[in-house]
Amino acid sequence: MARLTNHVYLLQHHQLKKEWSSSGGGAFVMLSPTEQWTLHAYYEFTKSLSDAELITHRRRISQSQPSLPHRAGKAVAKLAVFTDRLEAYRARPRVRTRKKGAPYEVRIFSEVNMNIDPVEFARILIQAAKERSDQD
């Protein structure tokens, strides 16, 4: 396998940034949370960094976590599969009826966010607590 050059690293960073800013977080929801954290850690696509800062970050993180570049490469490859097919997957017709006793199909998707707003998070928790107390 060819080594990742700085030029390709920067291209992938900008592609990930574009996918992240697309509606609904793009295809990131199709990756596991661990794969998403790996991409965030290696590519820093949620931060506004210059190309030189990104290259410096890449060099430092690769030294401190030697397996991270390989794991990030696998996650980028997996993301690429879903990026082109996500709209078709979302538009896929769902079966609305089911046989009696047949198990439900539940799909849960997650999207990690490196920049959590503590105030917003607290508001969500308070709202959930209020709703729960209203139900009791």
Image (cartoon, rainbow, N blue to C red):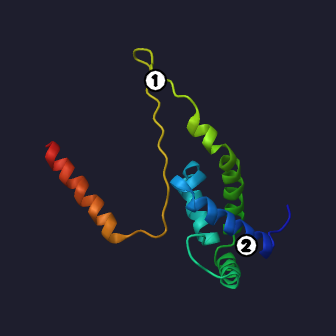
Quarter of the view holding residue 58: bottom right
Is 33 drawn above or below residue 69 in the view shown? above
Is 124 drawn above or below residue 30 in the view shown? below
Residue that appears at 81% across and 73% down: 5
Residue that appears at 62% across and 66% down: 17
Number of numbered discs present? 2
Quarter of the view holding residue 75: bottom right
Residue at label 2?
10
Q: Position of residue 10 (x, y in %)?
A: 73, 72
Q: Which circle marks residue 96 in the picture? A: 1
Which image quarter holds the N terminus?
A: bottom right
Q: Position of residue 24 (x, y in %)?
A: 51, 53
Which image quarter holds the C terminus?
A: top left
Relative to 119, is 82 on the left or the right? Answer: right
Assign a secondary structure to mark 1: loop
Q: Label 2: few (<14), some or many (≥20) within 10 Å?
A: many
Relative to 52, is 86 on the left or the right? Answer: left
Quarter of the view holding residue 86: top right
What whole-number distance in Å separates the C-alpha atoms at marks 2 and 1?
44 Å
In-front residue for pair 6/66: 6
Looking at numbered disc 1 in the image, what kind of residue is underneath it? Arg
Is 8 drawn above or below residue 63 in the view shown? above
Looking at numbered disc 2 in the image, what kind of residue is underneath it? Leu
Q: Position of residue 46 (x, y in %)?
A: 56, 70
Q: Which circle marks residue 133 in the picture? A: none
